[in-house]
Image (tube, rainbow, N blue to C red):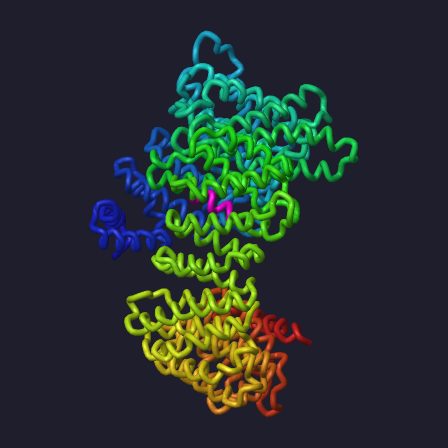
């Protein structure tokens, strides 16, 4: 269809009003139209005032696209005419529609940047009249935004950056003059809507220029923080005026406050601002003075000014994080009194924000904004303490102990979870919020040390409801990783006893779950603590977890597994208790719970004396054997029996006698698994765990394991089976005479499936080449076992390097690379074709994230020792790259020669 104005208008109408399929076709055609040379002409026709807004917006968007993507189509002598046309349509749309005006202003910004920002003032002079002030500010606002997002060459970017940074102080000074009207006398009358809108525009423009450059300019475009303090004061004065006159700060007043606070963040919160500590402290003091009355009035549950508070808190957090070192030093009293008070006041404002009244997210959604600041402050405090003389540390620590003790108390309160009143989405928000609280608790621990457990215990003892007790336990759980090694602070021990009592008696679901999590969370500490007040506590925890199984099966089973894994002595003493729990009806009701309980039983059995553990293991083995037979006869029943068996086997490594006994009992049930397609993989999971656990001790069973493995591959090759083969070959390949037959049978069966459709089974493809890689690298002599199928495997691998599935392609490349090192003769017939295939992939035939293994493959081919008659990588590279347009039309002859030289040089 021809790109005429009539056709374009029709396509735009279809895009906005047609059916879904028609809209997709229209979108594709309209997108293509934006790239054709004719677009430079039809945009002006479509921008006529009599066209619909959708048509005008499409034309303005097309103009922007052409300037960005097709600038080379405009000859230099036409630049002035294009500029005049853009200015003309901008002035024509000065009254709107706003969406079109904005896009045209962005187009002018793109034009300015494509010109290298030459004579910015001259280009914008037609917009510098009083009636066009709004247009001028719009263009000025989008110029830095377009610079930050626009793709351009390094030379043009450097030219633009220099010009814009030179213009930036003048622009910011103009914005400051506009914002300084906020210092007028508004004691009797509020500012008009026009004045407030002017503040919004000026603040938005200032913020845009303050963030000029992005990563290219870490100092921003606004010069030093000292130079920008007057602008920051004006921005904060706007917020002060609007807060004073508006009980509910909304609409344009809210826009102004948010824009001004964003400007303060941009001026005082960038990396360059931290280089000016004196100015930073001045900004901190003035920001604290602004925030104090706002927090006093509006920091209440369900605040009508939630958006204003969020913007203010975000600004305070940004300034605090940027100037954390300066704030910490000032708070410790190393600055003059006013600065000291300003730093403390900002820290207390953050604490008030963290302690926002009401439950999150039911009554407030702002306390989550502060979490990151505490990490930064803690980090600075610890750094300063580490570098301070010992005699000064106590004084400094008193300041921070007070602050972080209050923070910890706040976090206990904010952890309270009233889920009954929350929707499912809000419950998920609360879960993430409590995780953030748990992370922040660790920052408190870095400052407070053992005092954390004292604080949490006080909060628990003061709690009068289950919700509050659960919150205290949640904080106690967060401290588990910081529990002191081989030391037992009394508050910690008492809190753990509280958790034991709750696990034994409570029916409150959340409280019980958190208490059980505490038992599991402190398992590692219990295993390391010895004697004193913690004596017998491990056994109490194990008994409590077992007692809680009927009331909270999943949480209790997980706690029991952790306790038995880390607390060997109580696990051994209570081995019969744990094994009975694993055999109980509760323990058999859910496959996940059952796996945890069997794991707990395995740890207990391994910790106990063999005379006591062997009879108990035989009981478990008999139960498992029955479950495996039931699963084999009907896979829909007890579908987790195999996984449970593997879970138990994994824990018996310390006692090979137990693992061997279990294997003898269950191995007769496994042939039935090998015959059923859905049960082959569960069987391999058992075998893999058996071999991993027993290692050399599985030699008496290797014949049966090998038979099961081959039978399973005859039914359905799978990655888990290849893992079993890999373990057997690496561990026992030199000890069992039939290992070669096993390897060849399994590799051949897998290769036959993979060759039919490698991309249809990428995990199996990856598993095959991972097996071959490990055998070739670790036991290269074993390659003789598959010598007669090696050519087919090499050919298959050469085909698989071109796969789009990254894991499979990487595994194929890795095997071919190690094969080139260990046995180049096997790879030699395919080497030239493989080189060409690798180059085709590097040229774009496969995703770019697969370049690394392909490069390693080429280097391996270069390092390999080839027969003289076969050639070498240099010859294969030159032959492949001699073809025009290979591997991509973008590769010139010079590019190809540089590539060849780089590859060959890398190992020379």
Q: Position of residue 170 (x, y in %)?
A: 58, 29
Residue 514 within the segment the image draws in magenta: yes
Q: Which residues are magenta?
A: 513-519
On the rendered image, what quadrant is the C terminus found in?
A: bottom right
Q: Nearer the viewer, residue 110 or 284?
A: 284
Q: Position of residue 145 (x, y in %)?
A: 49, 40
Residue 337 higher or lower than 609, as above or below: above
Q: Name the image quarter holding residue 228.
A: top right
Does residue 56 appear anywhere in the picture? yes
Residue reaching furthest top?
A: 188
Q: Residue at x 39, y 23 (%)?
A: 304
Q: Is residue 404 left or right of residue 604?
A: right
Q: Is residue 882 left or right of residue 96?
A: right
Q: Nearer the viewer, residue 178 or 183?
A: 183
Q: Is residue 117 left or right of residue 127?
A: right
Q: Residue at x 75, y 38 (%)?
A: 387
Q: Name the image quarter holding residue 799.
A: bottom left
Residue 294 within the segment the image draws in magenta: no
Q: Position of residue 649 (x, y in %)?
A: 48, 68
Q: Is residue 711 left or right of residue 387?
A: left
Q: Position of residue 259 (x, y in %)?
A: 47, 29
Helix, strand or loop: magenta stretch: helix
Q: Residue at x 54, y 68 (%)?
A: 611
Q: Nearer the viewer, residue 426 or 110?
A: 426
Residue 625 higher or lower than 61, as above or below: below
Does residue 751 appear anywhere in the picture? no
On the rendered image, what quadrant is the N terminus found in?
A: bottom left
Number of numbered discs: 0
């Amino acid at each position: 269809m021809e790109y005429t104005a009539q056709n374009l208008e029709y396509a735009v109408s279809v895009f906005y009003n047609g059916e879904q399929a028609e809209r997709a076709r229209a979108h594709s055609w309209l997108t293509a139209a934006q790239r054709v040379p004719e677009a430079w002409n039809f945009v002006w026709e479509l921008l006529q005032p009599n066209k619909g807004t959708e048509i005008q917006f499409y034309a303005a968007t097309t103009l922007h696209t052409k300037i960005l993507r097709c600038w080379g189509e405009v000859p230099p002598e036409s630049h002035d005419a294009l500029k005049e046309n853009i200015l003309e349509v901008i002035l024509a749309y000065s009254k709107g529609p706003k969406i079109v005006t904005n896009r045209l202003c962005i187009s002018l910004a793109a034009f300015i940047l494509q010109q290298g920002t030459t004579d910015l003032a001259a280009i914008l002079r037609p917009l510098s009249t009083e009636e066009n002030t709004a247009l001028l500010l719009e263009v000025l606002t989008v110029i830095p935004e377009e610079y930050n997002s626009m793709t351009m060459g390094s030379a043009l970017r450097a030219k633009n950056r220099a010009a814009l940074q030179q213009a930036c102080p003048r622009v910011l000074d103009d914005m400051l003059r506009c914002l300084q009207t906020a210092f007028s006398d508004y004691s009797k009358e509020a500012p008009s809507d026009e004045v407030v809108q002017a503040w919004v525009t000026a603040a938005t423009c200032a913020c845009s220029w303050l963030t000029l450059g992005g990563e290219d300019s870490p100092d921003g475009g606004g010069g030093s923080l000292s130079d920008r303090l007057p602008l920051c004061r004006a921005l904060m004065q706007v917020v002060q005026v609007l807060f004073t006159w508006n009980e509910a700060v909304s609409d344009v007043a809210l826009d102004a406050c948010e824009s001004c606070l964003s400007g303060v963040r941009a001026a005082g919160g960038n990396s360059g601002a931290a280089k000016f500590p004196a100015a930073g402290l001045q900004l901190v003091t003035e920001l604290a003075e602004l925030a104090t009355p706002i927090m006093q009035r509006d920091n209440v549950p369900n605040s009508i000014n939630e958006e204003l508070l969020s913007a203010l808190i975000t600004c305070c957090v940004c300034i605090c994080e940027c100037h954390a070192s300066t704030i910490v030093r000032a708070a410790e009293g190393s600055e003059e009194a006013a600065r000291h008070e300003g730093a403390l006041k900002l820290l207390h404002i953050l604490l008030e924000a963290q302690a926002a009244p009401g439950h999150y997210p039911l009554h407030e959604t702002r306390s989550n904004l502060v979490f990151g600041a505490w990490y930064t402050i803690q980090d600075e405090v610890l750094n300063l303490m580490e570098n301070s003389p010992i005699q000064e540390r106590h004084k400094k620590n008193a300041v921070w102990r007070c602050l972080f003790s209050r923070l910890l108390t706040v976090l206990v309160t904010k952890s309270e979870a009233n889920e009954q009143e929350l929707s499912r989405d809000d419950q998920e928000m609360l879960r993430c919020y409590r995780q953030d609280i748990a992370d922040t608790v660790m920052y408190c621990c870095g400052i407070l040390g053992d005092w954390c457990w004292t604080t949490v215990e006080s909060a628990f003892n003061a709690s009068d409801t289950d919700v509050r007790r659960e919150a205290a336990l949640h904080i106690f759980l967060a401290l588990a990783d910081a529990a002191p090694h081989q030391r037992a602070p009394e508050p910690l021990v008492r809190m753990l006893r509280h958790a034991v009592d709750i696990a034994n008696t409570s029916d409150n679901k959340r409280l019980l779950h958190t208490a059980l999590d505490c038992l599991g969370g402190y398992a590692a500490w219990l295993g390391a603590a010895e004697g004193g007040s913690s004596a017998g506590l491990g056994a109490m925890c194990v008994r409590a977890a077992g007692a809680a199984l009927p009331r909270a099966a999943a949480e209790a089973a997980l706690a029991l597994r952790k306790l038995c894994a880390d607390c060997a002595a109580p696990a051994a003493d209570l081995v019969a208790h744990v094994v009975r729990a694993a055999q109980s009806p509760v323990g058999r009701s859910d496959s996940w719970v059952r796996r945890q309980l069997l794991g707990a039983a395995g740890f207990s059995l391994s910790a106990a004396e063999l005379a006591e553990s062997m009879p108990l293991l035989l009981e478990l083995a008999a139960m498992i054997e029955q479950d495996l037979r039931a699963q084999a006869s009907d896979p829909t029943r007890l579908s987790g029996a195999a996984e449970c068996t593997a879970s138990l086997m994994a824990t018996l490594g310390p006692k090979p006698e137990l693992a061997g006994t279990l294997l003898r009992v269950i191995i007769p049930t496994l042939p039935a698994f090998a015959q059923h397609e859905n049960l082959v993989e569960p069987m391999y999971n058992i075998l893999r765990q058996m071999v991993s656990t027993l290692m050399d001790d599985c030699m008496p069973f290797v014949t049966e394991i090998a038979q099961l493995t081959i039978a399973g591959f005859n039914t359905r090759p799978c990655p888990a089976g290849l893992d079993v083969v890999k373990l057997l070959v690496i561990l026992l390949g030199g000890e069992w005479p039939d290992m070669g037959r096993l390897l060849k049978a399994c590799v051949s069966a897998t290769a036959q499936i993979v060759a039919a459709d490698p991309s249809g089974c990428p995990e199996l493809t990856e598993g095959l080449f991972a097996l071959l890689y490990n055998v070739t690298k670790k036991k290269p002599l074993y390659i003789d076992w598959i010598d007669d199928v090696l050519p087919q495997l090499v050919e298959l691998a050469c085909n698989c390097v071109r796969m789009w599935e990254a894991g499979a392609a990487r595994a194929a490349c890795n095997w071919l690379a190690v094969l080139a090192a260990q046995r180049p003769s096997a790879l030699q017939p395919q080497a030239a074709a493989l080189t060409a295939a690798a180059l085709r992939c590097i040229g774009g035939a496969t995703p770019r994230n697969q370049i690394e293994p392909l490069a390693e493959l080429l280097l391996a081919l270069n390092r390999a020792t080839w027969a003289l008659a076969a050639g070498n990588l240099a010859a294969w590279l030159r032959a492949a790259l001699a073809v025009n347009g290979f591997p991509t039309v973008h590769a010139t002859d010079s590019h190809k020669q540089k590539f060849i030289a780089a590859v060959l040089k890398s190992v020379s």
